[in-house]
Image (cartoon, rainbow, N blue to C red):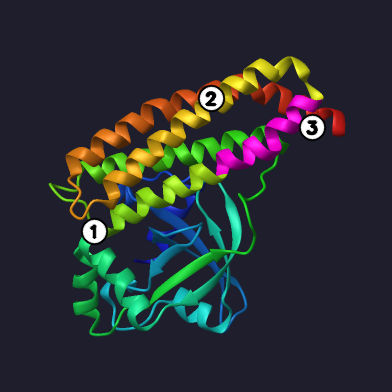
Amino acid sequence: MTNEFNRRIIEEFRANAGRVGGPFEGGRLVLLTTTGARTGAPHTTPLAYLPDAGQRVHVIASAGGSPRDPAWYRNLLADPRATVETGLFTYEARATVLDGAERDAVFARAVEADPGWAEYEAAASRTLPVVALDPAFEGPPQVEGGPAAQLVRVHDAFRRELELIRAEVAASGSTVGAQLRVNCLALCEGLGNHHAGEDQMLFPALAREYPALDEALAVLRDEHRVIERLLDDLRAVLAAPSPGSAALAAEVERLTTELVAHLDHEEERLVRALAQLTARAN
């Protein structure tokens, strides 16, 4: 990809909260900013990514099938610190180059999901490096606007992930590939952690400040339990030796219906209270 092509993608990505058209439309894309190994200047590149457990994501140094490793990869070898932009969040990350069986397993998942990765490796006549990017923090990245904006941004991230997974399930054919399983399980883990944090920290804090919210918070906790059962059902489908895409699609749709309604309901009841807390603190 030329610098001009990258520049247009980067501008579109930042202007549209991570959504772009062209060859990346409807795909998984991040912007990765590294420090130039020779220049020390920031270098931003749009890259396809693969989710993994926790908040780790993988990127592949394909350079479009070039025999030479891309600049961003050489930069990470010199300095593994990087900035990742998802369109909804920007966070600092640390890169780890995978090797051996770990690298091969991730690359195999990538090829199963998109054979183009194997074509790039064949064209490059080199083993394409696989890089893991891990956030340099725990929990979701912070955003401007305080807890109210943070809640909406986290919810939007879940909405977008559901949109991506639904499209991936629809395109999966009759069987469920290993990477799609990972994507779904990562979503389950993220939702479980998010709701546990709300139950244990956010909701008690709001109850102390706004006793009138007690009934609403009880309803939201009940909704968490409904979603937890749906996540368990989704995990059960994924645990089958050969899960079919039809069964997976049905569970993803059930989850989507309940979760989107819950996210909307939670924002309706809590965003104003969270904004008031921020205003009082300031």
Residue at 21% x, 51% y: name it.
Answer: 176
The CA distance from mark 2 to mark 1 is 36 Å
Q: Are marks 1 and 3 in contact (CB under 8 Å)?
A: no
Which label sits on residue 222? 2
Residue nearer the viewer, 207 or 135: 207
Q: Which quadrant is home to the C terminus? A: top right
Local crowd size for mark 3, using a 10 Å CA cut-off: few (<14), some (14–19), many (≥20) = some
Taking the image as shown, residue 66 lies to the left or right of residue 241, namely right
Which label sits on residue 113? 1
Mark 1 or 3, nearer chain start: 1
Q: Which residue bears the numbered disc 3?
A: 278
Q: Amino acid at mark 2?
A: Asp
Residue at 23% x, 85% y: name it.
Answer: 125
Residue nearer the viewer, 237 or 14: 237
Query: Which residues lie in the magenta part?
Result: 194-208
Q: Position of residue 111 (x, y in %)?
A: 23, 66
Q: Are marks 2 and 3 in contact (CB under 8 Å)?
A: no
Q: Of helix, strand and loop, which one carries label 3?
A: helix
Mark 2 or 3, nearer chain start: 2
